[in-house]
Image (cartoon, grey):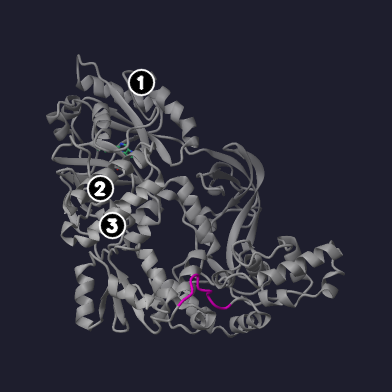
Amino acid sequence: MDALHRIEALRAELHAHNHKYYVLASPSISDREFDVLLEELVQLESENPEAYDANSPTQRVGGDLTEKFEKVPHRHAMLSLSNSYKAEEVAQWAKRVQASLPGEEVEFAMELKYDGVAISLWYQNGALVRALTRGDGAVGEDVKTNVATIRTVPLKLLPGAPAELEIRGEIFFPWDAFNALNQLRKESGEQEFANPRNTAAGTLKLQDSRLVADRPLDCMLYNVDGGAMQELGVDCHSEAVRRAAAWGFRPPRGKSLEVATTVDGIMAFVQHWDKARRDLNFAIDGIVIKVNRYDHQKRLGNTAKSPRWALAYKFETERVRTALVDVKYQVGRTGAVTPVADLDPVQLGGTTVQHASLHNADQIAKLDLRIGDMVFVEKGGEIIPKVVGVDRETAHAEGLFAPPSLVFPSSCPECGAMLDRVEGEAQHYCVNTVDCPAQVRGRIEHFISRKAMNVEGLGKETVAQLVEAGLLRDVADLYALTADQLLPLERMAQKSVDNLLQGLAQSKAVPFERVLFALGIRHVGETVAKLLSRSLGSLEKVAHATVEEVVALEGIGPVIAESVVSQFADPVFQEVVERLVDVGIQTEVVPETPTGSALDGEVVVVSGVFATMSRDEAKSAVTAHGGRLVGSISSKTTMVLAGDNMGPSKLAKAEKLGVPIVDEDTFLARIQA
Ligand code: IVH
């Protein structure tokens, strides 16, 4: 078989395995076997650039940067749905539908109303060619490069699909992935995302598809272009969805698509899912009821805004009413002040809730809250419930004896320093970064945590005790602690003191990338710390890097770069870091492999696909041999390591700036020399 045929065969095979794994959740080969096939395809594609295909299974990892998404008119307007909230409203709608179709037996298809972002997928001859957002309903934006990273969206359809096909569905962020993402953001001192829907919308609009590939979005389809289906002899929606599953789309699972002929049947489906939705790994905000037969849909037609043949039934979010007992203001390690409501304990979604988030000052002002008010609390699936409203009917009395409105404090509840609010941000920060005990405790707790310095024998309470006793003012003080200081403290027996001091001594061996994370620089989470340390190599280099140098590193944006540079410019921070260095913490990346310095001084951009290594391996090879990685070509770049399929604009830029382009073989020869 020649290479081109083999490429085609591999692509078909990998598409099929991808479908079995992600769509049907029943893989027939091991991950390892899959990787072997994929590697073969990567290699062949790199040797045969003329066979490039934007829909190859090798394209799932993202890679393209989109400066501006193309605006494309929808073939049919993307309408919205009319909403209902009560069984009565559903009954009235069903009655109207029946009255417009006299003498006909009307069937209703019922499915989940996914709480995400609508997407219109266009396929031509089985290949995904566009993925349009709703936009204003008439014109959408083509976010195909980002949508291509979603494993449950087929890039190539299985045989039998119509030559032209439009399919609509919803893209959403599953709960587990959303919570994991927020956990990472929390660890890096970044503001957490509010809910999965907005995060899915924001993610789809990211310009760097590699970032999108890191966020496991998912997609469910809910509408197949009726025209194409009728040509295939399919005459109703429920059948069309099943048929689409045969072309590679995810089939509706379990009881997520059913057909009923009565309002009672519809309401039974609604009630089932109102409970069962708690067990889903994604958010749904209701049920969609659709007249099943296409000819019926056509006769009913659309209003300007929504089809007459469909209705959304919206669930009530589970919400309880309870008394607001107090509001506390928590100060985090970055100084961010978060208001937390103390509540009269109340049952919500199976747990007792006593605390709820009040978000920020704006939320408090908007609700005009007062202690004693009855408030509404909801749990969105996030771990922390939130106060979403106040019961105006029973809210505080007006007039002379009314309790005072809550006012967000103007000074830090922990240290009394002034609070500062960054223009355009809702968060307040305590300005006393150096001495505020809450920030000091927070920084130390972060420093000693498992993923940072992993200091054993030291917990939250002891930290609080040591800060209180004046023995710890910053993280470097940890290493100056002595048995004589510790022993007189409460709950500090000889054994605990030994454990603590030993834990501290051992932490000095923690690798530099974790030290960098432990320093608690805003926006520098685990991933960024790894990136920074691996590409710059040492504390010395990180501390002296300029914003331009940091921004040039792949995967790092201006906000992170600013944060790193300004943190190291702070004399107080510098002093703490110097003392840490003096006690012997790790300040350099220990190379994994014995390195040469074949690439010393080189500033390298890695682009394209390689035959003998993955792109990540190529990048590691660059840093392991003393080169510095940057994400985009500039006049400072000294070499482009070019695999196959390197983008034409990159190529042109390198040529224009006279940056040497080095191919894989030359590169390997150089580092192996
Ligand atoms: S049908 C012409 N079915 O809800 C009507 N929409 O409020 C096409 N949605 O923009 C929509 N799940 O993004 C339909 N099973 C489902 C849905 C669904 C979620 C979204 C969709 C639409 C919005 C309308």
**Image height check: is 409 above or below 223?**
below
Q: Local crowd at mark 2 within 10 Å, few (<14), some, or many (≥20)?
A: many
Of badges 1 and 3, the one in the foreground is: 3
Is residue 578 rendered to the left or right of residue 120? right
Of badges 1 and 2, the one in the foreground is: 2
What residue sits 55% from the left and 62% below the top?
Answer: 187
The disc, 1 or 3, on the residue closer to the chain's N-terminal end is 3
Residue under label 2, please give it.
Answer: 10
Residue 544's tag is none
The disc, 3 or 2, on the residue closer to the chain's N-terminal end is 2
The quadrant where residue 222 appears: top left
Q: Position of residue 333 (x, y in %)?
A: 61, 67
Is residue 572 rendered to the left or right of residue 627? right
- Which residues fall within the magenta stretch? 587-595
Q: Position of residue 444 (x, y in %)?
A: 66, 69
Is residue 255 rendered to the left or right of residue 570? left
Q: CA distance from mark 3 to mark 2?
A: 10 Å
Q: Quadrant of ligand 1?
A: top left
Is mark 1 in CB contact (under 8 Å) with mark 3? Answer: no
| Amino acid of disc 2 | Leu
| Amino acid of disc 3 | Val
The disc, 1 or 2, on the residue closer to the chain's N-terminal end is 2
SS at mark 2 in the image: helix
Is residue 161 rendered to the left or right of residue 201? left
Residue under label 3, please give it.
Answer: 42
| Amino acid of disc 1 | Val
What residue sits 35% from the left and 47% below the top?
Answer: 34
Q: Position of residue 385 (x, y in %)?
A: 56, 47
Q: Among all residues in the image, which is located at the extreme top?
A: 103
Residue under label 1, please give it.
Answer: 263
The foreground one among 329 and 33 is: 33
